[in-house]
Image (tube, grey):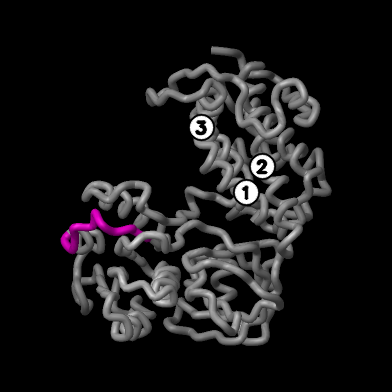
Amino acid sequence: MLRRPQAVRAVSVRDATRRCSRRGTVMDAPATMPTGDGTLRSRDAALVHRTLTEIAPVADRTASHFYGLLFVRHPDLRALFPAAMDTQRDRLLRAILTAADRMDDPAALTEYLGALGRGHRKYGTLPAHYPAVGEALLGALSRYATTWDHETEAAWIRAYTAISQIMIDAAAEDEERAPAWWFAEIVSHDLRTPEIAVVTVRPDQAYPFLAGQYTAMETPWWPRVWRHYSFASAPRPDGLLTFHVKAIPAGWVSRALVHRARPGDVVRLGPPSGSMTVDHTTHNGLLCLGGGTGIAPIKALVEDVAEHGDRRPVKVYYGARSDRDLYDIDTMMRLQRTYPWLAVRAVVSDRKGGGTQGPLLDVVRQGGPWQGYDAYLAGPPGMIRSSVDVLRGVGVPPERIRHDALEELAPMSPA
């Protein structure tokens, strides 16, 4: 085992990359090597993965050291971050590490980083900021990785250079056709339950998006704190956007939107993101699982299918803990009465509730077969993870299971 360096030296990513990488290349080392789990990866990717495995037990300390280095060396960058960082401190670092661990999947990596680069514009991120983040990253990793040598450092430099360049290029391209953010006025606020509100806003200019996508929202009460919300309808002729918001404990933005927001208040929206959209080139049926406020993008998908004139079967399973949590069931049942190809089934886990009772995934499994369907999942992260396992187990190909699990696609952002 190599000895951990006693002092962290400042690393200039800009200078080092001139020696270690080519512009836009994810890796230069063609050799492969196995990781701890036996997976064969390119050598650079394997070295990166080894570092991630080593720092996992000390992730909190690594994140603290990363931000300490970043703000001490570049105090001007502190203004890009929210005043309080206790609940979102690790998001920037986590996103970089997530991207780095996907080096051997260039297509997915480019799509992921492109969206992050475009989304970064709303934070005021500039190309000059990326070397500062890279230096802090290498400093934190070299401090806490148990194996850190020149080869590992070079692999990380190549990875980070590629990551940052893809993001910079995506942001520059997006700047030519879209604003960094949109202002949007709240025009209606419908409190469906004590903790769930349906919020409709009017953007200050055209806001193009696809049904099934989501956006980041900032409220006036928590500057520089952004949270993701799915669009609850397909694009509308009047340009209005609707979101379903559940107030969660210690959720600054969600609680403000549910309990404090009123018509006339103005929020900011980032660009649309997400790939959970309908493929209109096929005639596959749609199997849609919406848990809690995850029914919002599912409703948007149903509207999208209707607007395209499709008549393929769409099966919606609306999961909730109790009848009270089925806050949008009337809307979904009205859609079912309108479209004969749509079937909606409410599933509640509370045995005292109405509708179908029992675990959502047990009900879905019994409702198959699903091999001829494209699956769309929206809801709590645990539900999505379990749903993926169940659907793959009953024969749905992985490439036909779609979701935007934000804990896996952590935004590379200060908030």
Give whichever of discs 1 and 2 has the lower sequence position: 1
The amino acid sitting under disc 1 is Gly
The CA distance from mark 3 to mark 1 is 16 Å
Discs 2, 3 touching: Cβ within 8 Å: no
Residue 293 shows in the view: no
The CA distance from mark 2 to mark 3 is 15 Å
Percent x, y for residue 22?
70, 27
Magenta stretch holds residue 370? yes
Left or right of residue 32: residue 26: right
Q: Residue at x 65, y 62 (%)?
A: 225
Q: Disc number at residue 256?
A: none
The amino acid sitting under disc 3 is Asp
The CA distance from mark 1 to mark 2 is 6 Å
Percent x, y for residue 247?
50, 71
Q: Which portion, as a residue range, is magenta?
A: 366-376
Q: Residue at x 23, y 48 (%)?
A: 395
Left or right of residue 202: residue 387: left
Q: Disc number at residue 166?
A: 2
Residue 209 location, quadrant:
bottom right
Question: Vertical placement of 58 versus 390: above or below?
Answer: above
Q: Secondary structure at mark 3?
A: loop
- Which residue is disc 1 drawn over? 114
Q: Secondary structure at mark 2?
A: helix
Question: 47 or 297, which is in the foreground?
Answer: 297
Q: Residue at x 36, y 60 (%)?
A: 282
Percent x, y for residue 329?
33, 80
The amino acid sitting under disc 2 is Ile
Discs 1, 2 touching: Cβ within 8 Å: yes
